[in-house]
Image (tube, rainbow, N blue to C red):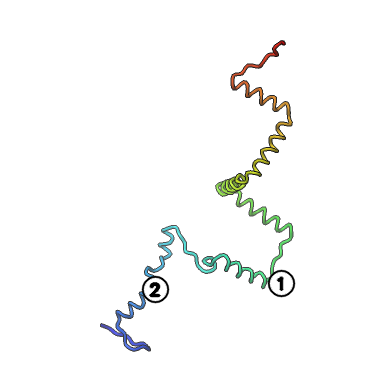
Amino acid sequence: MMASMDDRGMISKSEEEQEEKAASPSEPPPSSATQKAAGERQQRGFAAMDEERQRKIASKGGKAAHEKGTAHEFTRDEARAAGKKGGEVVSQNRKHMAEIGRRGGERVSQDRAHMAEIGRKGGEAVSGDRQHMAEIGRRGGESRGDQPRENPSR
């Protein structure tokens, strides 16, 4: 059995290995080749921090840049152009846009009072057009097989 010397005195090689195993995780982190094969990437550094900590750090950087006078401040036109550019890029992802619409629709439709108001406004707008309502009634009667009524003489 080999022994090594440190400031604590003599310890055996096997004891040294056991200490190292206890101090390190049970499995080594996956290599970059393993990560790429699995299609996953482990976040590191700033990306691995929780959102709150990231915001605090970014805020400090922004404040320092403003104090130093090197911060860029967007004009209204620059901000509008940047927003438009970002919107165009995001809107090209049809799946993403569909999901946004679906979530918005679900949220709005949960508000029964709001949905009732929409229905009321729509009904009022449509029913104000007497010719349109007459056409709807005619089509409804035709689909049921009803025959137009003749005025019975009294």
Decide if residue 25 is on the left or right side of residue 117.
Answer: left
Task: Tell me which amino acid carries mark 1.
Answer: Gly
The residue located at (60%, 48%) in the rendering is: 107
Task: Tell me the quarter of the image containing the C terminus.
Answer: top right
Q: Is mark 1 on a helix, strand or loop?
A: loop
The residue positioned 66% from the left and 22% from the top of the image is: 138
Badge 1 or badge 2: first in the primary sequence: 2
Q: Position of residue 141 (x, y in %)?
A: 63, 22
Q: Residue furthest top?
A: 153
Image quarter (top left, top right, bottom left or bottom right) of the N terminus: bottom left
Kindly identify the residue that appears in the image at 70 percent across and 58 percent down: 79
Q: Nearer the viewer, mark 1 or mark 2?
A: 2
Query: Residue 24's mark?
Result: 2
- Percent position (x, y) of residue 53? 57, 68
Q: Nearer the viewer, residue 136 or 111?
A: 111
- The CA distance from mark 1 to mark 2 is 46 Å
Quadrant assignment, res 120:
top right
Which amino acid is tagged 2? Ser
